[in-house]
Amino acid sequence: MDLPILSIITFLPLLGAFILLFVERRREAFIKGLAFVVSLVGFLLSLHLFAAFRADTPELQFVEKVPWVEGLGVSYFLGIDGLSLFLVLLTTFLSAVAILASFSVVHKVKEYMICMLLLETGMVGVFVALDLLLFYIFWEAMLIPMYFLIGVWGGPRRIYATWKFILYTMAGSVLMLVGIIILYLLGGRTFDLPALSQVSIPPGLQRWLFFAFALAFAIKVPMFPFHTWLPDAHVEAPTAGSVLLAGVLLKMGTYGFLRFALPLFPQASVEFAPLILFLALVGILYGALVSMIQPDLKTLVAYSSVSHLGFVMLGMFALTIQGVEGAILQMVNHGLSTGALFLIVGMLYDRMHTRMIEELGGLYRPLPLLGAFFLIVAFSSIGLPGLNGFVGEFLILVGTFLRSKLYAVLAAVGVILAAVYMLWMLQRVMFGEQRGQEAGHLFDLSGREIAVLLPVVLCILWIGIYPHPFLKRMDASVQHLLQQIQVRQAISHQPSAFRILDLGLRISELGSLHQSFNPKSEIGNPQSSDRRPLIAESLREGWNSSSLR
Amino acid sequence: MLDHLWLILFFPLAGALLNGLAGRRLGKKSVSFTACAAVGLSFLASSKGALDLWKLPPEGRSVEQALFTWIDSGAFRAEAGFQLDPLSAIMILVVSGVSFLIHIYSIGYMHEDRDFSRYFAFLNLFVFSMLLLVLANNLLLLYVGWEGVGLCSYLLIGFWFERRAAAAAATKAFIVNRIGDFGFAIGILLLFFTFGTLDHTEIFQRAPEKLQGGGMMATAITLLLFVGATGKSAQLPLYVWLPDAMEGPTPVSALIHAATMVTAGVYMVARFHVLYELAPFSLSVVAILGALTAIFAASIGLVQNDMKRVMAYSTISQLGYMFLGCGVGAFAAAIFHLMTHAFFKALLFLGAGSVMHALSGETDLRRMGALKERMLVTFWTMALGCATLAGMPPLSAFFSKDEILWRAWSSPYGHPLLWFVGVATAGLTAFYAFRVLFVAFLGPPRIDGKVAQHLHESPKVMTVPMVVLAVLSVVGGSIGVPAVFGGGNQFEAFLASVFGAQRAGGAEVAHGSAGLELFLMAVSTFVALGGIWTAYRFYVRDPELPWRTAARFRKTYDLLLNKYYVDELYDLFIVEPLRKGAVFLWKAFDIQVVDRLVNGIASLVAEGSLVLRRFQTGLVPNYVLFILVGVVAVVGYLAFGR
């Protein structure tokens, strides 16, 4: 198939948004319908990616590459592999779900739908772009529609929340832009990711670059201690905004680590891994504990995200096959489960006009169907075997255990806490005597709401019962990534600051997989120095002398 | 049948789905028919499977079947596959058989409930999860069933969710189980780490080479798995969820206590006996904790006034026996007791349900009495159940319990002290069992007038299952009559291909010490009779005596009545600190430190811009001055700075 399918999937929503510009604003039903159809078509097209994806190779697939700004070495370069396939699918899927869930929006429908479609283009773009500059453009562009979604359709403190969200993220990404430019100079004036990941960067510089990228990604994830924008943004965002924020936007951070930080800076990644594992672990426990006592349903779910994404980061930086595959799967799982949780919280809010847990109670009786969905989704988030969350979490634990028993054990405490905060919340909101509004005023799920939740729940069951099609498609890419890191990782210099953490990792190791990340020589380290111009050499030396050591 | 093991699981799952999705549109008759038929068919399939297995030669009695690869990542691999061997065959028979009777009984018990279809859907799901647990051929699939029964217990304990206590009990059950599962999960990880597989058969084959007998690793794995068992099977210190689980409908209690859920831990330990035998230390832990739990729970059961609570502590205590059996290496005896216990405990709970049914939900023993006249069937079946629980010969539990006690004395892992604790527990057990019987059914009536008018025997749909269970409780022991009584103990012989023929039919052992075995049996029987006699004195002959005794031993009585204040201790030392710590993290750390830092940086920029803004005066002379200063600085640096 020679159709540029990735471009179509990426820009179809943009086209839809463009058409919407010319639709009269009072034809709201048509606007909603059109936006939904566009996003649905996008999702159906992305199913083709799933079907036609070749699982046996780590190569980039559906590649589109044309020079864009030739003088600067910028190219329009799209492609996916096993790392990004499912995130593209997740994005198109959740976008369609979120647009369908937004049919209840009443004011400024046209602008709202335009924002949603623009957001989808930005998000898909982030996951398919393989040119660093193109990636950065999508990365930043996607903030604009999100800014409006929270700022215009948000709750009472929306202005504060938007500012915090935007400024925080931007502050992180600015350093990344500097990093991208340095890479560009270093790698022979190209933004081409596969080419750049062949460049060997001196360890000192690598640390700085890793730091620049990692900060941007860590804020987005968000990793502890960069997480405080998240509860604010979630509380104020409209339902669909929360769904996409938690479901997709946060994955950009984790995906960034996976796609850029690990292959570009393998040595620094391994060096920093103890720190990141530690922060991930703190995030898991901290997020779970703080989530437990939240008075507001939305902040509860927001803090639970901090905990869940801690798991993703833990698995990823365990740098074992199971860990990384679990992390990717858990990104999808979190998108589905937390997305659905926000949808349900939104539906509850539509009915009860409050999200405060203590003002709710006994809602299962008047809302049995919503309650049933709530239960399934909550248990998926808890990690009940047979539902999706378990597969991801367990693989992450296996992967982490192979690297560090102590960390895996501590992370497993987070699994207990997940049950505590979710079930306690369910107990207070859904069970007990009914509180709040009279039962007569409450209507159970409408047909549209069922149509919103049912597909998500079906995916939750599918991944839980038969994750094979998912794992199979990421296997080759993950193995390739890990080999790349292993091969390209030079003799590891442990920065003293992380020695203690690393010691913690080592102490708890009986049989060690750790050696595999300290190969004795740089076997097969691909040299691309011939393509490297002089300026890069000098830059490199300059950085070397001022390295962290 | 052996090629279609999945059918055993398929029926209850299909029933659960049908009733769960369409149950509200089906009538009560169709719902109950679907649910009962599902479990009934599953029982038939199990019977056929067990029979086919029986026909195979003893050494070939293990059939495995893989459906599909469930999780597959790197070297990690877990199948969705099943295994039928004598151990799982006995388990599926007990689970599906007893569950079937409980399903039938539920038709009568729940007939007025408005969530009839939800109830039966959950009940079927419960049976499915338990069958999955015992049929799984690898540890991870076992874990699915393991957590699945946890989920179902959550759903069913909290079935009447509008009652606060029920909702809280459900949450507590799941969370306490999760704490146990934490250990279990770490155990699974450690097993995978050691063996590179989670397949039962492979693990057992490689265990002798991979694990050093008595080594650290074997001990760690088995202890971690046992942590899971203490959660699921309600042992010290994680038993606290089970008494609260009484909040669910009574047939559910019967299901949890008899056929499903709590027996999972015993099954798991027995299933992994190969590993436990490599870790004598773990075996001792299992045995000692089992014995302690047995006597601890029995002592609480002595004074509880809630009929169902007495039964709940009795279950904990009896499970302690089973673990005592496992811990002394008498795995077959433990499974034997698991089976007889399933019969009589299901019976006792169904009897309690029948009483509640008659008394409009009353469970307080103090508001019962003289029920015998109006509820003959319930009385007699309950009487048989209590006698079985008390271990009266020749009822089924006599054989199973004394088998455990005998092994606690005679096995190389055993110790006379363990036997002594077991026998003391038997005395307490007999006392509390007959206390319930005497107070509720004999003795003076203390029932509220209004309730008393409605007093009636339960309908046939409830009494028939009770009668069947009573018969099973009486004769169920006959398949395991030990050699000293001339029985072949076919039960152990059947299980020998799983547990090894360590007793070789019991022949040689009996040869040397038959006299001792008989003597020990006689001792435990007399102790139990003593318990019954005390109960008779206390509650039939002299109803004032209990109060005088309680008054005399006020402190002990209060301690027991308040269940050693364990719940309060947990609240004080675990729940509250956790909650307060979380509040501190959020209010004092997250908001005051982290967020302040973030906002502080932002306002630093804002403040800084206020300062810098002053330079933007808009006056050209000022700007010229700045330029001049800048030029001087740069030139100065270039000239002298380097």
Image (cartoon, grey):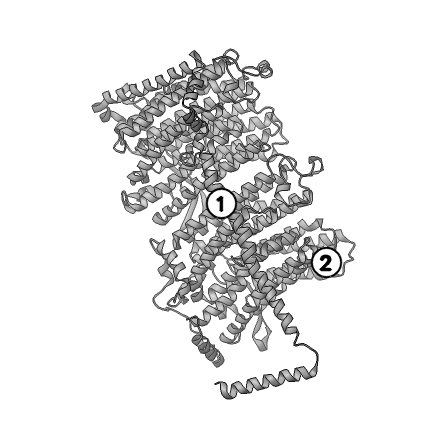
- The answer as to whether the residues below labels 2 and 1 share one chain is no
Q: Residue at x 29, y 34 (%)?
A: B500
Report if residue A387 is visible in the image: no
Q: Quadrant of residue B397?
A: top left
Q: Which mark is residue B530?
A: none
Q: Residues within 10 Å of mark 1 (few under 14, many from 20)?
A: some
State the separation of the CA atoms marked 2 and 1.
46 Å
Relative to A392, residue B440 above or below? above
Q: Is residue B58 left or right of residue B607?
A: left
Q: Which mark is residue A111?
A: 2
Q: Give whichever of A351, B622 is nearer the camera.
A: B622
Query: Could you tell me the amino acid type at mark 2?
Result: Glu
Quarter of the image for the N terminus of chain A: give it. bottom right
**Chain of the residue under the numbered disc 2 shown in the image:** A
Secondary element at image label 1: helix
Chain of the residue under the numbered disc 1 shown in the image = B
Left or right: where does residue B227 sit relative to residue A55? left
Query: What amino acid type is highlighted by mark number 1?
Result: Leu
The one of B88 and A443 positioned closer to us in this rendering: A443
